[in-house]
Amino acid sequence: MKAIISIENLASSFVVTLWTPLFVGIFMAVVVYALWPGNKRRFDSAARMPLCRD
């Protein structure tokens, strides 16, 4: 009879229960930051930087 709890099961459970929601939260924070209306001017100027000749 095999053991029900193994290292693979514990690691998989740990990843699913802790890291996945953490990375989803970080991703959502980055998206909100990128789409925040107050950052539009900063991102527009950064988008034009390669076209500037100084």
Image (cartoon, grey):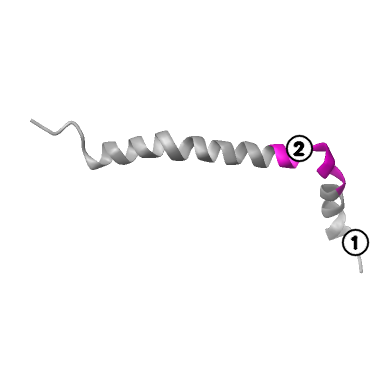
Q: Which residue is mark 1?
A: 52
Left or right placement of residue 38 versus residue 3 in this view: right
Residue stretch in magenta: 32-41
- Where residue 10 sits, quadrant-wise, is top left
Query: Which amino acid type is marked by label 1?
Result: Cys
Magenta-drawn stretch contains 33: yes
Crowding at dot 1, Cα within 10 Å, few <14 / some 14-19 / many 20+, comes out as few
Q: Which residue is mark 2?
A: 35
Query: Which amino acid type is marked by label 2?
Result: Leu
Crowding at dot 2, Cα within 10 Å, few <14 / some 14-19 / many 20+, comes out as few
Where is 40 relative to 1, above or below? below
Residue found farthest to the left:
1
Left or right placement of residue 26 versus residue 39 in this view: left
Indicate which disc residue 26 carries: none
Position of residue 43 measured from the top left corner of the image (x, y, whole percent): 81, 48
**Dot in front, 2 or 1:** 2
Q: CA distance from mark 2 to mark 1?
A: 24 Å
Q: Residue at x 70, y 37 (%)?
A: 32
Q: Residue at x 82, y 51 (%)?
A: 47
Position of residue 12 measured from the top left corner of the image (x, y, whole percent): 34, 38
Q: Residue at x 87, y 54 (%)?
A: 48
Q: Main secondary structure of the magenta part?
A: helix
Left or right placement of residue 3 versus residue 39 in this view: left
Magenta-drawn stretch contains 49: no
